[in-house]
Amino acid sequence: MKSLMITLLAAIIMCLPVHATEVSLYSADGREIVVKSEDEERMRAEGWYGFDEVYTALYSEDGRAINALNSRIEEWKSVGWYENIADVQTMLYSADGRELTVWNADVEAFLQVGWFRTLEEVQTTLYSADGREITVWNADVEAYLQVGWFRTTEEVQTTLYSADGREITVWNADVEAYLQVGWHRTKDEVRTVLYNQNGEEKAVWNAEVDAYLAAGWLREKQRPGIDPNRPMVALTFDDGPGPYTEKILNCLVENNAKATFFVVGNRLKTYSGQLKREAELGMEIGCHSWSHANLTTLGASAISSQIKDTNNLVKELTGVYPATLRPPYGSHNAAVRSAAGAPIILWSIDTLDWKTKNADSTYNSVMNNVKDGDIILMHDIHSATADAALRIIPALIERGYQLVTVSELGEYKAGGLGAGQVYGRIN
Ligand code: ZN
């Protein structure tokens, strides 16, 4: 081992003076000569050059390199060699953010094992609900999605609508603030369907509703045969449905008249046939609570379920969700008005039919007091009331009254009724 070391050392020492005093020069056509250093300048003057002046390094796409004579570079290039190393290498990217520079000949193999040519392929732009953008490596996308980032702006933006027909797209984080200053989530909230005298309908921006109403448009489709300029009254029947409801319905149909039935929720399943017929005949079905409770004695959530349970069951059985409320005993307070979600309909003529149970008395209380716009209170669970109704209905028509539902009365007389508002006579 020691002798080998000495031999190597000696070789290095022997080489040094040679390299220090001799130099290789080249002709333009690639011949090499070795000359003493002091002769270099003279030889150069005779057309000899340094290596770099005669040769240029060229590269192949599979990673080889050669030194080509300058005079033959174009020849080499024509068979796939390149002067610039950047021309034979390609930068690739991984989904977890690594970069790699490979020979062009190897690119396809790398693409097959999860490398990509462009940053766009390994990065994804994500969006936050408050309007920020971030570009992350694909490998990290799932982690970001879990902490509140989203792939598309659709997921973090919401289009809102104004009552005068404008649209705006805002970041989800800002939606609540916009809702508070008069923007709405759906077009239905900012448009109202109105009807003209010919029954044509049109959805108009809420901001324009008053102007349309002033021009003669109506909130409800006008019933054929109803003349807004002639007197009308609304017959109302509470506490049903019941065994006498059918009789009253038959009379209404025969006289082409409408009435409103304020029904009690816990009776609906027993008398579902009567309820369905009310709806089929185009009568209005209003809410009269679930158990005929005095709503003013209940808390807010109990009031709400008395109303909603009833309305939901009516909707389930008839397909129509009640649009009016008559609280039992006509009893209401701020909590009831707030929970109503519909106009509160009282009355202007109380027949006291439940008390007298006398058809003559009920008939007289109506016919002696009736005026245009009256809302007349009766109860379809009493036999005497049904008997009275059979006389009252034709008699009112005979006297020139049109028999309409309470919502129709509100429409024709007041241009519509307001939720939580309390109505007696509407004129
Ligand atoms: Zn009642």
Image: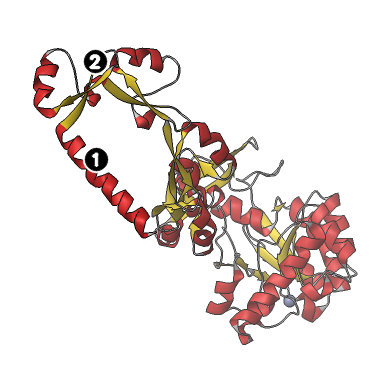
Residue nearer the viewer, 201 or 258: 201
Looking at the image, residue 306 lies above or below residue 397: below
Which of the 4 image quarters holds residue 218?
top right
Residue 252: image location, x then y, percent: 82, 55
Residue 214: image location, x then y, percent: 48, 44
Which of the 4 image quarters holds residue 351?
bottom right
- Identify the element where label 1 is drawn: helix
Type of amino acid at the residue the image marks with label 1: Cys
Q: Is residue 243 left or right of residue 411?
A: right
User: Label 2, on which residue?
Assistant: 27
> What's the mark number on residue 266?
none
Q: In this view, does 177 lie to the left or right of 145?
A: left
Residue at point 71% right, 65% down?
A: 286
User: Label 1, on which residue?
Assistant: 15
Residue at point 65% right, 81% down?
A: 302
Residue nearer the viewer, 298 or 17: 17
Quadrant where the C terminus is found in the figure: bottom right
Residue 130: image location, x then y, percent: 40, 58
Q: In this view, does 389 lie to the left or right of 147?
A: right
Judged from the image, the quadrant occupied by ligand 1 is bottom right
Residue at point 85% right, 74% down?
A: 382
Query: Sequence order check: which comes first, mark 2 or mark 1?
Result: 1
- Identify the element where label 2 is drawn: loop
Tell me the CA gap for discs 2 and 1.
25 Å
